[in-house]
Amino acid sequence: MKGSKPQPSAEVALNIVGERVALGPLREELLPLYGRWINDFGTMRMLGLPPGPVTAEKERDWYEQRSKAETDPMFTIYERETLRPIGNTALHGLDHRNRSASFGILIGDSDCRGKGYGTETTRLMLDYAFTALGLHNVLLTVFAYNPAGFRAYEKAGFREIGRRRESRLMGGKLWDEIYMDCLAPEFESPVLGRIFSPEASR
């Protein structure tokens, strides 16, 4: 029926469920959608990746690597109400010995930006990093030409720790690359603390 919302699929596996978004594993059947996101130059400019066509073959190679990676856990982001996939998020360079990782996110559907989905996803990923994996430090980089991203990360719990000055070209101007991090003691679990706890405390 026209105007009706997509029906949630019973086959969608969800690992972490927040108020407005949920996170689940990568899915092979979503490769065409992942490919559409990665070929959107407007989206990719925020990630600092060189613009260029990504073929279906390259996207499948990416999926094969990511879906089996031990040090780069990646999730599909869903709009919780509809279970519509809206992006991807990951921890990169997971280092259990030093209890550290880097964070990345892509909101692929433009109509889902500016709604707080990115902020909540970031908080859920910090929860996963600190509460589920026992990490201590999570790092990210954001470009100064992306103030909305900076504010979202700050709201989620990250703080600026330094800058690489005038290292990114955008619109004919050089911009700073901003480094932000979050430590486990600075973060309060919104979801997983209720799951990863002794039985007696539940």
Image: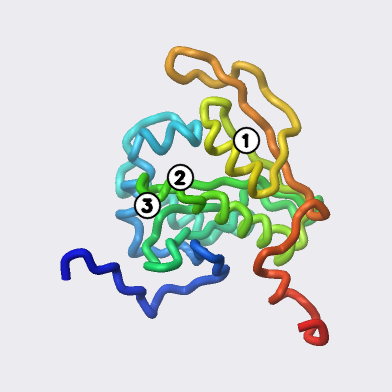
Amino acid identity at mark 1: Thr
What's the residue at 42%, 36% (across, down)? 44
Q: Residue furthest bottom?
A: 200
The image shows residue 84, relative to residue 37, as above or below, that is below
Q: In the visual, does 110 lie left or right of 106?
A: left
Amino acid type assigned to the residue bearing label 2 in the image: Gly
Estimate how packed mark 1 is, as few (under 14), some (14 to 19) or many (20 or more) residues with alpha carbons within 10 Å: many
The spot of residue 132 in percent (x, y) is 70, 66
Which label sits in the foreground, 2 or 1? 2
- Looking at the image, residue 50 lies above or below residue 77: above
Q: Earlier in the sequence, mark 3 or mark 2?
A: 3
The answer to which of marks 3 and 1 sits earlier in the sequence is: 3
SS at mark 1? strand
Q: Residue furthest left?
A: 1
The three-letter code of the residue at mark 3 reads Tyr
* Residue at (71, 75) in percent of width and height: 194
Report the disc number at residue 34.
3
Q: Which residue is mark 1?
A: 141
Question: Would you say 148 lies left or right of 179 here?
Answer: left
Q: Residue at x 49, y 62 (%)?
A: 20
Q: How many marks?
A: 3
- In which image quadrant can residue 176 be found? top right
**Of residues 189 and 93, the one drawn nearer to the viewer in this rendering:** 189
Instruction: From the image, state whether disc 3 or disc 2 is nearer to you.
Output: 2
Helix, strand or loop at label 3? It is helix
What is the spatial separation of the Cα atoms under label 2 and label 1, in whole angstroms?
19 Å
> Is residue 1 positioned above or below 169 on the image?
below
**Rendered residue at 69%/58% (across/down):** 129
Which residue is the site of mark 2?
Answer: 114
Query: Which quadrant would the C terminus be assigned to in this image?
Result: bottom right
